[in-house]
Amino acid sequence: MKKFNMFIFINKSSCLMILCILIQQAIVASSTLWIAKLSQAVVLKQDLSLWLVLFILSLSLVHIPGSGMTYFQSKAAFSSFRKYVDIFAVSFRGKAQLRTNIDFKQERQPYLNNEAWLVISEFVGFITNLLGTFFNIVFNIVTLSFIIDKKLMIAYAITIPLITISIKSLKTLVTSSAKHAQEDRTAMMQSLLPAWDSILIGNQLNIHLWKNYFIDKYKNAKKSALKSVLFSELTTIISMFLNLFPVIGTLVWLIYQNIGNEVFLSMLIVTFPRQITTFQCMNFIVSYATHWNSLKTRLEGLKSALIITEPINVGTISWNRIKAEKDNTIITIDSINSIQDITQDYSPGRITLRGDNGTGKSSLLALIKEKLSEKAFLLPPHSDMFFEFSSNKSLSTGEKIIESLDEIKKSGKLQLLLLDEWDANLDKNHIVNISEKLNELAKEICIIEVRHRS
């Protein structure tokens, strides 16, 4: 079975995105070299045409790989999201009994419907910005050290352990706050599920209760999100000041060491903007490193949404309270084997399961579906399962059931059709028409149904 890991983000588009980043940042770094050479030529009164042309070209050509990077970033996000949806489908396909657990659905569905795309698109954007900033720093430090002095490379290297210490010291706070922020945000999204019916139907009681519930989850999500941002920014500020001293100290020392050297000082001065940009980029790296702790937590949330770590309550089947009816004969059942015996190994025919509410009839159908897998087709009530007619929003409930049965029949060989309260909310004409259709279908396959009405 496919597993969720960082490899879902590796695809052709992400590789081309990285290539565009490398080319873009190499061009950016080259502009630093060309402007330094341009300054040197001015001071020495040499011909500056070549360096001017190269500098202008570097400013112009940098936009080409930049556009490519943006294009492939978008493609990479969609490819990664598609992989996650595929893994989600593989992880839970055929686990029909889990559908009866409302809490499980409310917990996991937001990850598929909302959180997965948000986190994946944010992660791809994060990687794009991180790599762009990283290569910008590396290429520019190498270029500046080559132009000015190799001691600059040592100064920047000293900042690495300082930054690492500051990040690690606050990692626990950042990770914990990010985890709480994700949990509270998911809970807020869950609170929106009853909103549609509550608002459109307009019952004051339901709207009041829903609004209070939503506001409570909203406040929790807002508070934890701001707390997460606060800890991330605190790490950035501390690291920024630690980063400042070795680089600024080295630049001041180089200026005093080269007083009177007009060529050196002119190159140093014209590259000051690039020095400032590089310094800012290093602060961005700190911010990214801090943000990574929270983003990693959200990625782990996506991974955990694919895993069942503890037994899930899938409903209890009260065998002694469920009866099977076949050819107007009531038959007692005590296990799934009884169903198999009554249907003669699921031979063509029609069986009706009857029992009071809460006896586990729907859970029994789900259990049979899991046991027979692709040999059985489960059609539950009020389902969002996709059919060819799904785009036709004008169909009534009865018409949808008829269309569903037609599509199921055309789909190929099927041993068993499981119907759960298909007659709920239908008028007598539709019930009669569908029941006749089921009688015809029962000549070819086994049908086990739970009826809402007698």
Image: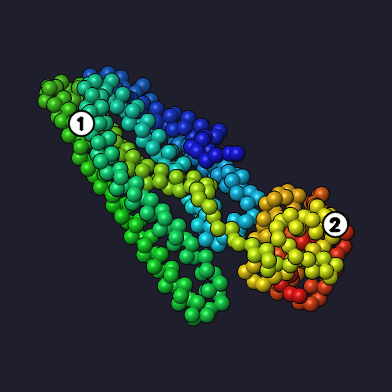
> How far separated are the C-alphas under marks 1 and 2?
82 Å
Q: Is residue 115 left or right of residue 37?
A: right
Q: Which quadrant is home to the C terminus?
A: bottom right
In this rendered view, identify the residue nearer to me: 386 or 424: 424
The amino acid pointed to by label 1 is Val
Q: Which quadrant is home to the N terminus?
A: top right
Give how far across and how far down residue 348 sits, in percent: 85, 57
Task: Tell me the residue that label 1 is attached to.
Answer: 247
Give how far across and how far down residue 448 sits, in percent: 77, 61
Q: What element does badge 2 sit on? A: loop
Q: Which mark is residue 36?
A: none
Residue 353 visible somewhere in the drawing: yes
The amino acid pointed to by label 2 is Pro
Give how far across and how far down residue 190 sits, in percent: 49, 62
The residue lying at 68 percent from left, 66 percent from top is 320
Residue 434 visible somewhere in the drawing: no
Task: Tell me the residue that label 2 is attached to.
Answer: 348
The residue lying at 67 percent from left, 72 percent from top is 356
Q: Quarter of the image holding residue 170? A: top left
* In the rendered image, the vertical position of residue 55 relative to residue 193, given as above or below: above
Earlier sequence position, callout 1 versus callout 2 = 1
In this rendered view, identify the residue nearer to me: 273 or 318: 318
Q: What number of labels is visible?
A: 2
* In the rendered image, the vertical position of residue 203 relative to residue 389, given as above or below: below
Q: Crowding at label 1, few (<14), some or many (≥20) Cα neighbours within 10 Å? A: many
Q: Is residue 352 left or right of residue 251?
A: right
In this rendered view, identify the residue nearer to me: 384 or 59: 384
Give how far across and how far down residue 342 sits, in percent: 80, 59
Q: Crowding at label 2, few (<14), some or many (≥20) Cα neighbours within 10 Å? A: some
* In the rendered image, the vertical position of residue 124 relative to residue 109, given as above or below: above
Q: What element does badge 1 sit on? A: helix
